[in-house]
Image: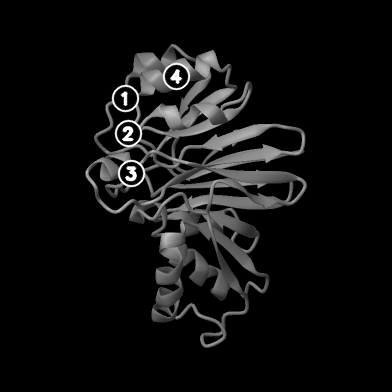
Amino acid sequence: MKKTIITLGTGAGYASPERGGAANLVLIDDQVILLDCGEGAAGWINKLKKTNAVSVIFISHMHADHIAGLFVLLQNMKIQKRNKPLEIFLPQTGINDLERFLPAVYLDAPNNDLLFTIRFKPVDVGTLYDNKLFKVNAWMSDHFVKDVIKNKEQRPAFGFTIVTFNNEYLIYSGDIASIECIIPELQENSILICETTHPVLKDVIEIAKQKHLKSVVFTHIAPDFDLDEKLINMNDFVFLANDGQLYNW
C-alpha cells in the first residue's frame, strides 16, 4: 500500500504569500482525500493533476482559512468536466449556508452545467467514512473551548484520524486549543499533523515521545511564528511543513 501526505497549505488565519490556508492531500493507493481546503489549495491540486481524483473532503471547522479554497476547487472540477459525485463532510452548522451559497457562485447543478453531484454530509464523532481500504474517524476538538466558557454560541470543531486496513494511523489536528484533545487518538508509530498556532509545541513533542509516534509534522504556521529551532533540531522525528511538501507514511 502506497501512502503519502502532501501539505498543500501550511499557513494560519492571516494570509501570507509564502503559505496558503490549511489544506492537506492524502493519497492511499489510488484514493485521494482532502483534509480542509484553505485558500490556494485548488492550484496545488491542479498542479498535481488530482482535481478530479479527489473523492472526499473533510472540513474540520468553518473558519475561513480552512474552507475558503473550496469554491475555486469546485469551479475547477466543473471546468475539468468532473462527472462523479463528490462527498464533503463538514460541521452541520455550515451545511445549509453552503448549499444556499453555491447558486450565488454558479456552482449549483444542473443550472450551471455542473456534471457532478455535491453531497454535503455532517461531521459527528465516530466513523464518517469507510471504504475497506481505510476509514476516517472524527473526534471533537477543543478549538472553541474559550467561546463556551464565555457563554457564546458553541461552534463545533473536529479533528480526523485516518486508519488503514492494516492499522496504520494518520492523525490530523485541525485547530485545537491544547494537545489534550488529541491524546486519546495517538497510537504508537502513528503520524501526527499538528497545528502550531494554539498548542504549546514543547507539550506536543513531549506527548509524541511518550506515545512513540513515528513523526510529527507541524503546520498552520503564522507569519510571525517564532520557531524554536533547537526544539525542532533536537528531535529528528519532528518536521516543520512547507506548502507542497510530500511525506510518506
Q: Position of residue 138 (x, y in %)?
A: 55, 45
| Residue found at x 53% / y 19% | 237
Q: Amino acid at mark 2?
A: His
The residue at the point 55 percent across, 82 percent down is 109
The residue beneath circle 2 is 198
User: Label 1 vs label 4: CA separation?
Assistant: 14 Å
Disc 4 residue type (three-letter): Ile
Mark carried by residue 144: 3
In the rendered image, the quadrant that contains the C terminus is top right
Query: Is residue 28 visible in this depiction of the protein?
Result: no
N-term mark: 4 or 2: 2
Disc 1 packing (10 Å; few <14; some 14–19; many ≥20): few
Q: CA distance from mark 3 to mark 2?
A: 11 Å
The Cα atoms of the two marked residues, 1 and 3, are separated by 25 Å
Query: In the drawing, what numbered circle is on residue 205?
Result: 4
Instruction: Quickly name the residue at label 1.
Output: 227
